[in-house]
Amino acid sequence: MVMPMTSLATGSSAAWIGLALLSAVFAALVGVLGKVGVSKVDSTLATAVRAIIMAVFLVAAALATGKGALLGTLDQRALLFIAGSGIAGALSWLCYFLAIQTGPVSGVAALDRLSVVFVVLIAAGFLGEPLTLRTTLGAGLITVGALMFVFK
């Protein structure tokens, strides 16, 4: 049985694992499809077109699932942090598309996944998430793995 996205997001505590794996698959497709897409197009223009398509798709998804009515529940603090996240995401994708235009998509994607390492460090400092031996070792292994893709 296929669960609706809203059930996955609010369902069992393990639902996040499936959603995260789907995110990884879609992120892989972004890299591969994007590499072909920017081969003869300006990467900034390609990123802007992609953002418009994403915005239309996401607004439609929000409206289709009845989430549009929740727009009024955003307070100023939440909106500020969401806006910051949006700007960071836009900058990330601008850099990503510039990088895949000239570099190997597997190397670019590997270095992009160093975001996990940066998340661990920033979440420890900003959110107070624990920086355990296990997370430090995992971050170290991710770093080594990413570098192995770049320096073959």
Image (tube, rainbow, N blue to C red):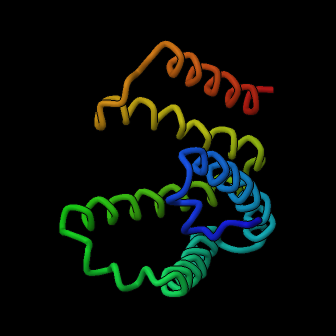
Residue 25 position, x and y percent, is 74, 54
Q: Residue at x 45, y 37 (%)?
A: 119
Q: Is residue 35 left or right of residue 64?
A: right
x and y, in percent, of residue 49 in the image: 60, 80
Q: Dividing the image into 4 quarters, which one contains the C terminus?
A: top right
Question: Image height check: is 34 above or below 120?
Answer: below
Q: Quadrant of the N terminus?
A: bottom right
Q: Is residue 52 above or below residue 103?
A: below
Residue situated in front as seen by the camera: 80 or 96: 80
Farthest residue to the top: give it. Answer: 133
* Quadrant in which residue 113 is drawn: top right
Residue furthest to the left = 76
Where in the figure is residue 89, as x and y percent of width and height?
47, 59
- Residue located at (54% from left, 56% from top): 11
Query: Residue drawn 26% across and 72% down?
Result: 74
Tell me where residue 122 appears, x and y as whole percent. Answer: 37, 35
Q: Is residue 81 left or right of residue 62?
A: left
Q: Nearer the viewer, residue 8 or 138?
A: 8
Disc tally is 0
Q: Is residue 9 above or below residue 76?
A: above
Q: What residue is shown at x 41% (from left), y 21% (from top)?
A: 131
Pick the residue in front: 68 or 56: 68
Is 58 in front, or is 103? 58
Left or right position of 89 against 7: left
